[in-house]
Each structure stands twice: as structure tokens, then as C-alpha cells.
Amino acid sequence: MHKIFLTLVAALFFVVNVQAQGCAEPESDDGGVTVFGFLQAQYDYGFTDGDNTSTFGFNRARIGVMGNIPYDFSYYVMLETSPFMKGKPNAYLLDAFITYKRFDFAKVSVGSFKSPFGLELSTPCHALHTINRSKFANELSAPDRDMGIMILGGSDTTMFRYSIAYMNGSGLLVQDPDKFKDIVGRVLIQPFNWMHVGGSFRFGKSESVDETVAEPDERTRFGAEIEVEKFGFLIQGEYIWGEDKGSYLVGGGCGGDPELVQGSVKREGLSIMALYNTPWNLQPVIKYANYNPDIDFAGNNNMEHITTIGLNYFFNEWTRLQINYEYKAEWEHEVENDMLMVQLQVRF
């Protein structure tokens, strides 16, 4: 099955005729600098066993610059300034890459950028339809940002889109400690302007965290996705399967630091989301996601389920209010951990 998937992906790379790995793209070719960013002020109320929790904070607070350098290059730099992302008061570099873009069918980017994997990870943080990404998408796409080189081509108006990257595999702005690299890729087929289906993959190795083991640790990921937008409705579905040998990452996502755990594991998760664009700038949304953090340990009894019920209101093109209630259920050991979140976002 894996060989068939890889053969299809390889064939598609040669017929593709550009999707952005950042949150936006420069609009002019005159060499001017564009300052951009967004703020997400948020209130969280947690329904927990014992005392409930309540806090205000910034989910994300990002600012960046981008522009074109005549005639074939562009640049993109973004900082994360929210102290709640990594639990540190200092801002840190999130994205920084240079793109050679003479050929639309094969642009080349070098620097720090998002791993080209999956539907939710590839959606910019300010464009997510729910406040949080699915847990399985965060954990199975880690490291979500990395250093490397990427070739990408296609756009919203072409039949095919693709991106394939050769990356350190060590995470955000971390020097690669060994000789191994990760290969990450995503391919979309767009038979209609209102629909796409796609697949993603990641293959990587790293030196074993166990010094007594000579064989390197291995990381394998496969993903599938679909999106349909018609008659005001938007429906998305995504599935990711992953296997780690020797060690694996837990947590992370959106610039967070994942934890390295020693051992081998197989994991999987899926999500289904639907929303409707009403005539009153309102978007009711519902999303179901599950995540099995160890397939072999207890089968489906290890599954975590999260159902998000939300409402998005757009004051204008740049300002959005999101209200989400997350109902969480764990089959093996259910606890009280639901969450109510309210977020006001401004883009500039």
C-alpha cells in the first residue's frame, strides 16, 4: 500500500504546473516592504475535575515583513511575540525564508517554514475555522516548523498543487545534530474549483536517543484529506497515520515545543468539520476529531474524542470573533476537561 501511494505521488510531481508556505504573499513586484500580522486576544474557561479554571491571554501575537526583490526573489519573515506560546517572555523567530519564483511550476524556498504536511497544518493560524487545531494534527505533524529547502508549484486555479521539502527534522530553529534529514511532501488534486483531495507523507531518521542502540530512530507519516465548498457550505476531512521507531514527539504545534519520548509507537487520528456561511457574517461550525496515541496499547479503548461547537462572526474583512466549546471524551479514563474559548482576532 505504501509503495502504491509513493508511486502516485512521484508521478504527480511531473505534471504539476503556487501555494504559499507562509500566511500571505507579497502583492506587488516593485520591491516595497509589506508589514503584516495578527493579534488573537483570548479568554479560556476550563471545566475541570475540582476547581474550574479561567484566564485571559494572547493565543498568538505575530508580526512580520515580506516583499519582492526584482525580479525573481521574495522574502518572508515573521515573529511570534505572545509569551503564552512557549511560556517565555521573549519574542522568537517563527518563519524566515527566501523564495526563487521565476517558474510558477517549481518555486524554491530556503529557510525556516512550515512542514508541507496535511490540511490543518497547512491552514494559516489566522484562517483556522476553529480556535484550536486538532490534537492529532498537532502531534502527528510535529515538528510543524523546520529548517530546509522546498520546491512547490501550482495554485488554487490549477488542477494540481504540490510541495516537497528536504528538512532537518529537528524542529524550529534547532541545528540538526546528525547527518539524517526528513523528506516531507503534500499533493493536491483539484478537479473542480469547489473541491480538492490530497495526500501527504513524511519519512525521517535521527540518531537514536538510546546511546546503546546503533540503528537510527525512524519516523513515518501518511495523510489523506478532502475539502468541498459549495452553496455556502464548507466540509473538510483529514486522516493521519504515523509510526515512530526508537523515539517520538508528543505535543507541540503552532510553535510550541514538543516533548521527546523514548520508545516506539503507532498513532492515528481523523477529523471531520462542517460550517455554513450565512448572509449575516455568521459562520456556525462543528468539528469532530479523534486521536489514538498508541494503537497497539489498547486498541480503540485508548481513543480521545473532541467535538467542537463554534460560532464565528466577522465584523469586517480584518476582524473576527470566535466562540468555541470543546467537549472532550476519553474512552479509557474519562475526566472532566471541557473548555469554553472566546477569541477576538485582528489582522493588519
Image (spheres, grey):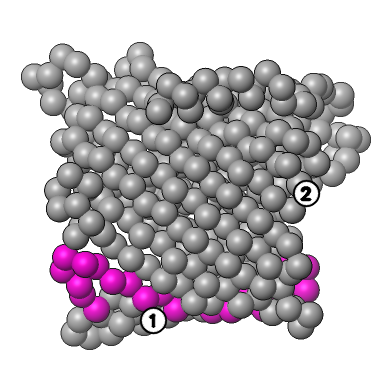
Please, which residue is most extreme toward the bottom here? 51
Q: Which residue is mark 1?
A: 45
Q: Secondary structure at mark 2?
A: loop
Q: Residue at x 19, y 52 (%)?
A: 299
Residue occupying the point 28% across, 53% down: 292
Query: Seen in the image, is 99 located left or right of residue 279?
Result: left
Name the element at disc 1.
strand
- Residue 319: x and y in percent read 71, 71
CA neighbours of label 1 inside 10 A, class few (<14), some (14 to 19), many (20+): some
Query: Is residue 240 magenta-colored?
Result: no
Q: Is residue 208 above or below residue 138?
A: above
From the viewer's side, name the closer residue of 309 and 110.
309
Q: Residue 69: x, y in percent?
A: 82, 28
Residue drawn where x is 39% and y is 35% of the image: 221
Seen from the viewer's position, the closer of residues 128 and 60 is 128
- Decide whether the magenta segment is chiefly helix, strand or loop: strand
- Residue 148 visible in the picture: no
Q: Identify whether 126 is placed above or below 313.
A: above
Q: Which residue is mark 2?
A: 193
Name of the residue lying farthest toward the left? 212
Is 179 placed left or right of 62 in the picture? left
Q: Which residues are magenta?
A: 311-336
* Residue 24, x across and y down, in percent: 71, 47
Viewer-nearest of labels 2 and 1?
A: 2
